[in-house]
Amino acid sequence: MDELSKDGYKLREKPSVSDPDKGDGKGLGGSGEKGTECGTKNVTGKTAGCLYLCATPIGNLEDITLRVLRTLKEVDLIAAEDTRNSLRLLNHFDIRTPLTSYHEYNKYEKARYLVGQMQQGVDVALVTDAGTPGISDPGEELVRQCYEAGIHVTSLPGPAACVTALTVSGLSTRRFCFEAFLPHNKKERQWILEELKEETRTIVIYEAPHHLVETLKELGQVLGGERQIRLCRELTKRYEEVYANTIAGALEYYESREPRGEYVLVIEGRSMEEIRQDQQRSWEAMSLKEHMELYLSQGVDRKEAMKLVARDRGVRKRDVYRELNVE
């Protein structure tokens, strides 16, 4: 009977893996240790490997899960955004699995290589510098290529800075949108900011310390200075900070203090009441008679048109009737 892992997957012998970063062509991890099997048969009849998206701590090492630790030990190869950073994590937990680089500047070519390895039966774990792979990082390209090649992908849940910040913000968590880092391209950046102007969901944005003040200025100009914001830094660490204020208040605060560390900005969405009031003001620029004619010209009968006009302006139908008769 086949031996099973704790996930219920069958275990198999580890295949030999070569690392293109080193160019030596020698096998890595071919020591006969066991690895987790979760793939399907490839064209040669061999069982394909699997891609494991392993979430790692965003600050506090105690946040890593037992499942991630076990998987990092059992896979044949770990693909890391920054091998030096990941090596410190692996050394801390005495994990000796071979590492290879996978980052923004090699993601297309390296993803093809990793997919090829998995097609030969190699199990690969993907880790980012901190948090969950695939969230605002090059991991999404590897996942895309895996799906195109029919490689099984599974995610091992864990820390994510965007969700951590959202839950401690005190703002609405029922509906939210995640924008990651705003683009540097001015036109694209302005286009996204204009979209966010009408966004009713809570907004989550990442920002670097040296861009924070300028971003707060832009947010104030587009969203309005009175919008509530939370600026979260050092999340899960000893000196974790969540600064609550309006956008205008936060700008004033950080103009006199040097921002330190990476920030997660959690911003209040536009209220439905504010949208309703803006719509009412736009109708008020039109006379009551013109407003009625707008609906009548569309084939709406007079009684229904009065009801629609009253709804648009936030008044009672009889008030519309009285005003029209006076005119």
Image (tube, rainbow, N blue to C red):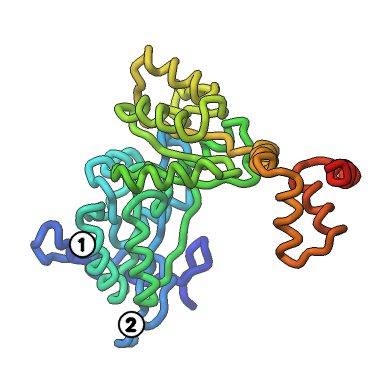
Residue visible at 37% across and 16% down?
255
Q: Are marks 2 and 1 in contact (CB under 8 Å)?
A: no
Answer few, some or many: residues within 10 Å of disc 2's Cα (few below 14, many 20 plus, some between 14 and 19): few
Vertical position of residue 159 compared to residue 102: above or below: above
The residue lying toward the viewer, choosing from 188 and 15, is 188
**Residue 125 drawn at (x, y percent):** 35, 58
Residue visible at 73% across and 56% down?
293
The residue lying toward the viewer, choosing from 146 and 90, is 146
The answer to whether residue 189 is left or right of residue 325 is left
**Residue 80 drawn at (x, y percent):** 28, 51
The residue lying toward the viewer, choosing from 60 and 298, is 298
Vertical position of residue 22 compared to residue 18: above or below: above
Q: Secondary structure at mark 1?
A: loop
The answer to whether residue 322 is left or right of residue 12 is right
Q: Which residue is label 1 attached to?
A: 28
Residue visible at 26% across and 70% down?
117
Residue 99 visible in rendering: no
Mark 2 → mark 1, Cα distance in angstroms: 19 Å
Q: Which residue is label 2 attached to?
A: 46
The answer to whether residue 121 is left or right of residue 200 is left
Asked which quadrant contains residue 170, the reply is top right
Residue 150 visible in rendering: yes
**Residue 134 drawn at (x, y percent):** 39, 54
Vertical position of residue 189 compared to residue 299: above or below: above
**Residue 227 drawn at (x, y percent):** 56, 29
Query: Identity of the amino acid at label 2?
Result: Lys
Asked which quadrant contains residue 150, the reply is bottom left
Please tell me the numbered disc located at residue 128.
Answer: none
Residue visible at 81% across and 47% down?
310
